[in-house]
Image (cartoon, rainbow, N blue to C red):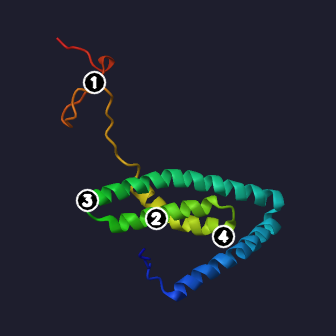
Amino acid sequence: MIARSFNVPANWAWLGLAGLAILPFAELTAFFWVASRVGLPLALIALVATSFVGVSLLRRQGTAAFSRLIRALQGGEPNGAARESMMVALGGVLMIIPGFVTDVIGFALILPSLFRQWREGPPVTRRTRPGAASGDPKVIDLDRDEWKPVD
């Protein structure tokens, strides 16, 4: 069996492990700081609310980023879209994890995708009804109540 190497420098691996070891302490410190400022009940509500916001953002931004990834793969330029899709997915997962530090990091990862969506507006999609007669963009299919014969 052949083992594959990810070619990650040892310094980066140690930095990642140190970050994972420090994260619980940073989360507890941030929680106690927020709780001392706004009170324990509001801090707990904020903790749960940010998880729901993370789920919502992951659902909304994740599908948009995934569709951009598919379009980029079809067009032959996957690098930027793949990076953005991974950032959105990681950001959404970090926002779902309870904790203020992971929420800030997750929101920072999702923020560029949010700015892009706000700047470009909602995606334009062609609506097709089941049973539409033509897929030609020059043809407009109308229901019976949408037109009337003119003599």
Does dot 3 land on a helix, a strand or a loop? helix
**Alpha-carbon neighbours of circle 2 within 10 Å: few (<14), some, or many (≥20)?**
some
Q: Spatial distance from mark 1 to mark 3, Cα to Cα?
A: 33 Å
Is residue 75 left or right of 52 when viewed as pictured?
Answer: left
Residue hosting label 2: 86
**Badge 1 or badge 4: first in the primary sequence:** 4
Q: Tell me if label 1 and label 3 are in contact, CB under 8 Å.
A: no
- Earlier in the chain: of badge 4 and badge 3, it is 3
Q: Which residue is disc 1 drawn over?
A: 142
Q: In the rendering, which numbered label is found on residue 75? A: 3
The label nearer to you, 1 versus 3, is 3
Q: Amino acid at mark 2?
A: Met
Under mark 4, the amino acid is: Val
The mark lying in front, picked from 1 and 4, is 4
Residue annotated with mark 4: 101
Label 1 residue SS? loop
Tell me how far mark 4 sits from mark 2, CA to CA: 19 Å
